[in-house]
Image: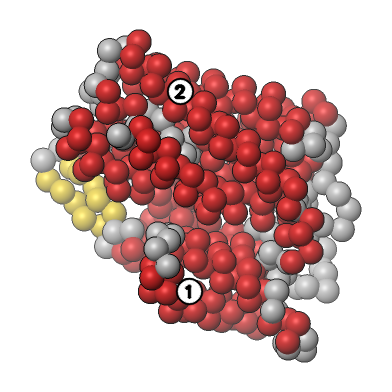
Amino acid sequence: MSAIEISGLLTFTIAIVVFFVGSGINSAIAPLRQFNIPEAVTGGLLAALATLIAYRFFDAAIVFDLGARDLLLLYFFTGIGLNARLDDLLAGGRPLVILLGLTVIYLAIQNVIAIGAVSLLDLPEGLAVFLGSASLIGGHGTTIAWAPLIAERFGVANALEVGIAVATLGLVLASLAGGPIARYLITRHHLKSGPGQEAVVGLPKAVNERTDDDISHVSLLRTVLVLNVAILIAFGLEEAVEWTGLKLPMFVVCLLVGIVLTNTVPRLLPRLHWPTRTRALALVSDLALNVFLAMSLMSMQLWSIGGLGLALVVVLAVQTVAAVAYIVFVVFPAMGRDYQAAVISAGFTGISLGATPTAIANMTAVTKTHGPSPRAFIILPLVSAFFIDIINAAAIGFLAR
């Protein structure tokens, strides 16, 4: 078996090509558009299958340099923070608390399913952690962080492989399920976006006319400058955050810095051009998200999940059915049965099965077609990228006793 290492610049370039391939396929296949499948997901999954073929039939393991992906994630979440106006945060207080409560309840349900599956299928006890919230809600990062402890404490030699497999398949399932769920809810309940809403990520597909907020090289450079300054501040605060004892991912720190800056700088310097809710920021955020997602999916090593058995498929099938049922019959009604609730429902697949970027990608695909929902893009990341990580860590610690 030979390893083919792809450099950072080439990886970035391939990710752009992968996005355009996905866009072309979505344009040619109507159901993909109708069910709001993100272009990066379509292209990324196709690329992942290509690397699987290379591995199986040509003994070549393709490894991508993903350094640029991490920076794109910081750009994206900083942009989300810069769009978080104080009035929206205050107005989103009650929905945010409701969504957090719903997520905590589902975290418990997910782990109960995992514990039951381990018992019924006679699997090693330690795998309950990775068949539940550690891999599905926590994603790859949480899985990698906890795998050594679980392997040592329960004697499960393949704990990391199982966890990565569950996280990977969960990411795929979340990418494919969010759009159809939102389409079903929007169509069934005849929902529409409210008037006067600005796009947070991406530009609506139906918008062609010029506006007072037209994009230019100046507006784009101004936006990138603000993003860079915010990210640099976040890096400067990294040691201070660690000193408090909180272990927050850097993208969460960037999100919080963006929120603080966007609610202070424009008030202190009202004449300063600020990118909040501008088309330039929506465009940069969309670019960062799509390339990030394309890189994440195309770099999946699908061969690593082979041979893990029918039990893994059965458990994930049950977890997926439970997630969809919970979203349709609990999350959507509890969040108000309106358009925002439908958008959040699309994003909840990322919370329950995949990862926050997947959740945002699902919501972006929906809002590009059906109209903006700014508060959804504030509420969901705060829950999935901040609060729930802390609660999930406590839940994993309980399961790992």
Spot occupied by residue 154 in the image (x, y as percentages of width and height): 20, 30
Q: Quadrant of residue 204?
A: bottom right
Query: Farthest residue toward the top?
Result: 120
Vertical position of residue 62 compared to residue 170: above or below: below
Vertical position of residue 131 compared to residue 135: above or below: above
On-image quarter of the C terminus: top left
**Mark 2, residue position:** 112
Discs 1/2, front = 2
User: Which sits in the foreground, 245 or 30?
Assistant: 245
- SS assignment at label 2: helix
Whether residue 176 is visible, yes or no, is no
**Mark 1, residue position:** 234
Query: Farthest residue toward the right?
Result: 195
User: Which sits in the foreground, 266 or 43?
Assistant: 266
User: Which sits in the foreground, 253 or 76?
Assistant: 253
- SS assignment at label 1: helix
